[in-house]
Image: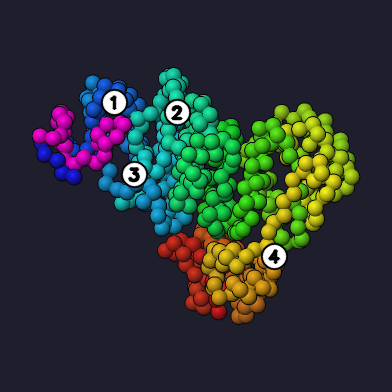
């Protein structure tokens, strides 16, 4: 809203034009100054003056195109003039954007974060509302009100940050630092890719403890077809253990951009409850409560997919993976002495495995033992081992898979009937059309096979097929003309349609 000169506060050479927001940090105005428009923070209390003096002092260390720039500040902290950015908040900007564009903005944000960290500054409150993006897709990290010089300033008392974007250790009362910014940055990218932060589908009150007691659902489960390396990078940033997070921040821009060249993460539907339970067991083992879990079901049921997800989560959390070997009992001394939580995965059902499992349970070793098999293990169940069986897919889940693969929904009921809800059988049925299509050259068939796994960027496809990007586009033209593949995200990615 426009304001009159009588209602605006005294702000030196700046004339307040429009009140943008007001809150615990004071008022924020759009104002006009000698050199043009600014965003003007105005204190309304002594504590807010202290905060503005602090923010102004922090900004004296900052000079980066992706971090908001200080224009001028009153020495008393009554006001602080900042660069005015005409743009959208991150949440609104990200809606409907393609993966390539999102990753580039995330990489630029990481460059800004690396600049802060390189100057010894931890932001402390990275979240979508603290990022503004202009019409050239140039982001700015804003609001350094609770940022601090990690080596020079004492940690703040009490919780400071935003639930949903605050790292687990901050919720536990530890001081924020560079690693906490990495977790918050991971949550920020997660929100850009999925539309909401980790744990956002829960009761808001639960955000005070969920990051402490569980792991978020993989971003690729909510945004199918993401590059595998991007999925792994984002989930790695969300590791509960600060030391396990990829970093420092200066490595993230290149890691993000390089992730687009990786093949897509296999599309996963269903088993949400089972996957959540397994992530909970990873956390329990991390906290000292060992478990034995039997993943059982027929071939193609998804039991190995569940095992693979457990292994990925444990690796991100810093578990030591131990090999069972021919004599399982000989592994016991190593399990007892391990300084870190351990993971053992086996497909054996022999007596040695049962004896090892019984000791893990009886001694409460800091170990997660995963047994992948075709049927339950009753003896272990009596000893306290958990049993998880992947449920068959339903019609809605088949439709989700078809949607993620950009296939016709008309196939859903027939595919469900033919596969009997078995994920492996369903994947085999979905692969058949690629093999049956006639009139393709071998390079065209290879391209179609790759895109049948899920949407891929032009760059990633070119790398997989060892072609230049222009040659890849030429190869794709006849497949596009036949409707066998489609363009997504304004041509940034290709996906198989297989609708003939």
Say which mark, if any, is on residue 132. Answer: 3
Spatial CA span between label 4 and label 2 = 47 Å
Spatial CA span between label 1 and label 3 = 23 Å
Residue at image coords 81%, 41%: 383
Residue 148 is situated, as x and y percent measured from the top left of the image, at 40, 26
Residue 290 appears left or right of 74:
right
User: In the rendered image, is residue 476 in sight?
Assistant: no
Front in this rendered view, residue 368 or 254: 368
Vertical placement of residue 362 versus 128, above or below = above
Q: What residue did someone put label 1 on?
A: 48
Residue 457 appears left or right of 64:
right
Residue at image coords 55%, 58%: 225
Vertical placement of residue 198 versus 250, above or below = below
Q: What residue did someone put label 2 on?
A: 159
Residue 358 appears left or right of 471:
right
Q: What stretch is highlighted in magenta?
A: 6-28
Callout 2 crowding tier (Cα within 10 Å): few <14, some 14–19, many ≥20: some
- The local secondary structure at tag 1 comes to helix
């Amino acid at each position: 809203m426009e304001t009159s000169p009588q209602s605006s506060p005294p702000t030196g050479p700046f004339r307040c034009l429009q009140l943008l927001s007001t809150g615990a940090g004071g008022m924020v105005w759009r104002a006009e100054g000698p050199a043009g428009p600014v965003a003007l923070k105005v204190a309304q209390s002594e504590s807010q003056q202290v905060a503005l003096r602090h923010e102004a002092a922090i900004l004296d260390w900052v000079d980066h195109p992706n971090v908001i720039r200080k224009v001028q500040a009153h020495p008393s902290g009554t006001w602080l003039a900042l660069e005015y950015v005409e743009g959208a908040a991150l949440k609104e900007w990200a809606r409907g954007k393609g993966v390539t564009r999102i990753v580039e903005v995330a990489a630029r944000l990481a460059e800004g974060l690396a600049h802060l960290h390189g100057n010894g500054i931890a932001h402390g409150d990275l979240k979508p509302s603290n990022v503004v993006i202009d019409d050239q897709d140039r982001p700015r990290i804003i609001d350094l009100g609770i940022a601090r010089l990690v080596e020079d300033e004492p940690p703040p008392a009490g919780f400071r940050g935003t639930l949903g974007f605050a790292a687990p250790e901050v919720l536990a009362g530890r001081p924020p630092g560079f690693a906490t910014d990495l977790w918050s940055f991971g949550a920020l990218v997660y929100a850009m890719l999925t539309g909401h932060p980790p744990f956002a589908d829960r009761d808001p009150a639960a955000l005070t403890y969920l990051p402490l007691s569980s792991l978020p659902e993989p971003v690729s489960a909510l945004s199918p077809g993401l590059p595998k390396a991007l999925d792994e990078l984002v989930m790695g940033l969300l590791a509960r253990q600060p030391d396990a997070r990829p970093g420092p921040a200066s490595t993230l821009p290149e890691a993000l951009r390089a992730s687009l060249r990786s093949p897509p993460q296999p599309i996963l539907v269903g088993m949400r409850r089972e996957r959540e339970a397994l992530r909970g067991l990873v956390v329990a083992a991390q906290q000292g409560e060992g478990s034995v879990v039997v993943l059982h079901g027929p071939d193609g049921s998804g039991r190995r997919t569940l095992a693979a997800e457990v292994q990925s989560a444990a690796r991100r959390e810093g578990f030591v993976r131990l090999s069972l070997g021919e004599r399982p009992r000989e592994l016991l001394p190593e399990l007892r002495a391990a300084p870190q939580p351990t993971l053992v995965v086996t497909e054996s059902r022999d007596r040695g495995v049962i004896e090892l499992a019984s000791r893990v349970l009886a001694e409460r070793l800091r170990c997660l033992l995963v047994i992948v098999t075709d049927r339950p293990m009753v003896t272990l169940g009596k000893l306290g081992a958990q049993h998880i069986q992947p449920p068959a897919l339903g019609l809605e889940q088949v439709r989700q898979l078809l949607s993620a693969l950009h296939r016709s929904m008309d196939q859903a009921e027939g595919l469900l009937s033919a596969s009997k809800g078995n994920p492996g059988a369903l994947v085999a049925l979905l692969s058949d059309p690629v093999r049956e299509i006639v009139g393709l050259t071998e390079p065209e068939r290879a391209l179609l096979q790759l895109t049948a796994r899920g949407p891929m960027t032009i760059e990633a496809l070119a790398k997989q097929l060892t072609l230049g990007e222009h040659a890849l586009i030429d190869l794709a033209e006849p497949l596009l003309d036949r409707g066998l593949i489609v363009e997504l995200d304004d041509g940034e990615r290709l996906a198989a349609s297989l609708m003939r």
